[in-house]
Structures are given as structure tokens and as C-alpha cells.
Amino acid sequence: MTIVKEYRIRNNCTVDEYRIAQLYAVAKMSLNETGGGEGVEVLKNEPYDNELGKGQYTYKIYHLGSRVPAFIRPIIPKDALILHEEAWNGYPHCKTVVTSPYMKENMRIVTETMHLPDRGTTENALNLSPEQLALRQVQYIDVADNEAINKKAYKESEDPSIYKSEKTGRGPLSKPGWEKDCDPVMTCYKVVTVEFKWWGITSTVEPIIQNSMQNVFTMFHRQLFCDTDEWYGMTIEDLRALEEETAKKLIDKRQEENANKTDFN
């Protein structure tokens, strides 16, 4: 059964600021997640203008490795631990499609996102069909809720409940219900549709994928807020230059790792 979940993430920034913050956080995360033969390859990052509208298109390959749950790893071939991601960022609307070359049409994770200047109260931000709405489950994500993350993943430097921005004066998000009073505020509405067909483990893996997506969204936005003083004031031109620099660093990292493996062998 296809699982459709809508995640609503409130953020203490404006919609325009979030566009910059998101791009900065993605570039930073890509660098942090790459190493030891795992991580991200950026194959394309270019403007698009087609039937989907206008925006920035990216094509990435993710090498998962140890990031896959341990109990699944032994039964999945190594080729299945490589995922391809295509993204169309036509901000404020974005669409991301993740597929597996190994599983082909049997795996597809689609995330559609709308960014709105509200407090998570828009009931159908992505204009879902009646059929999709019937399947949809809504989940609010509180980025300042430390109980919602794995204790091993906790970092004081990425804790919105204690972080205060020197440039903006925002934070800490320590007051219960902060999202009802903070100013500025915006919400990311993310609808994730998971299709995973693998005999014997479909019903087990689909919820794991959704839980993993929720965890990724939570950790990503915690870091995004706590990096406010790093991205605040940057322009879209600054971000494109940063993305280009990041792509080169990712290539260098992977080439260095491959050279080291060759030397070791």
C-alpha cells in the first residue's frame, strides 16, 4: 500500500530567507555526509524552463552504505544502496524524485514541497486530489523538540531550544508553542509518497522510509535554524557560487578516497 504523509515544519524565518537557508544547508549537509566511499555526487545543477515552470534542476547520486538500517543491509545487494535523485526547485514549489537503478520501477519516493508564510494552517497547500487526501497522514515537526530525535544524534550546536542568533536576535526556541508566537514565521509543507515493491519486506520497509524521511527533515531544519548567522545576508548569487564550490569539493573527496583504496589494494 502506498503511504502518503504530509510533514509540516514551522521555521523562525521568512519565506524569502528560507530559500537561501535551504540551499546553504543542503550544500553543507552534502559535504558533511560524504566520506568513506559514501555520500553525494552532484552530476547536474542547472536552470530549467519547461512544462514544470522555471527554476533550478539538480541530479544527484547518493551512496548510502552504512546509512541503511543494519537489519536490512544483509539482504540488499550493494547495487541497491545507490539512489538517484532528481529535483526541480521552482521555489516556493519544489519537487524531488528518488529512484533506485537496481529496483527500477519498484521503488519511487516523491517529495513535493510548498513554502508558505503561515503557521502550518493551510489544509491543502499542495492541491492534493481527493484520492491523495484520503490516504494522507499529517505530521507536524517541532524542530526544537529534543525528545523527537535519537539521543545519539543530539548536538548542542544544533539545538534550537538553546541557540540564539547574534545577527537577527532570533531564538532560543525554548518556549512551548514557540511556533504560535515567533516572528517571522513560515511553514514547509512536504508531501512524501513512498512506493516500494519487494516481496516479503514491502510492509516493513515503507514505514521505515517514511520514518527516515521524518528524521532527515527534523535534523535538517534543526541545523538550518542553528546556522542562521552563517546564511543570513547571503544572496542567491552567493549560494550558486557556494554550490559550484561544493560540487568540486565532493568530486575531490571521492577521487581522493578512490586513490587511497587503490593504493591500499
Image (cartoon, rainbow, N blue to C red):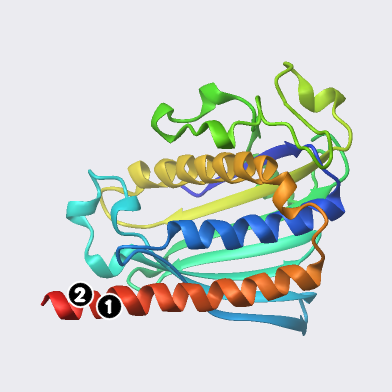
Q: Quadrant of residue 19?
A: bottom right
Residue ranking furthest to the top: 176
> Relative to the observer, which residue lies in front, 54 or 31?
31
Which residue is rendered at x = 79% and y = 63% of the image?
A: 91
> Relative to the observer, which residue lies in front, 50 or 247?
247
Circle 1: residue type: Asn
Picture coordinates of residue 127, whole percent (x, y): 79, 52
> Relative to the observer, which residue lies in front, 126 or 185?
185
Marks 2 and 1: CB-CB under 8 Å?
Answer: yes
Picture coordinates of residue 58, whole percent (x, y): 61, 75
Q: Quadrant of residue 244?
A: bottom right
Q: CA distance from mark 2 to mark 1?
A: 5 Å
Determine whether, in the image, residue 248 is placed left or right of residue 123.
Answer: left
Helix, strand or loop at mark 2: helix
Looking at the image, is 23 positioned above or below residue 114? below
Is residue 120 among what the camera can see?
A: yes
Circle 2: residue type: Lys
Residue identifier under label 1:
258
Question: Of the numbered discs in the image, which one, if any, rests on residue 153?
Answer: none
Residue identifier under label 2:
261
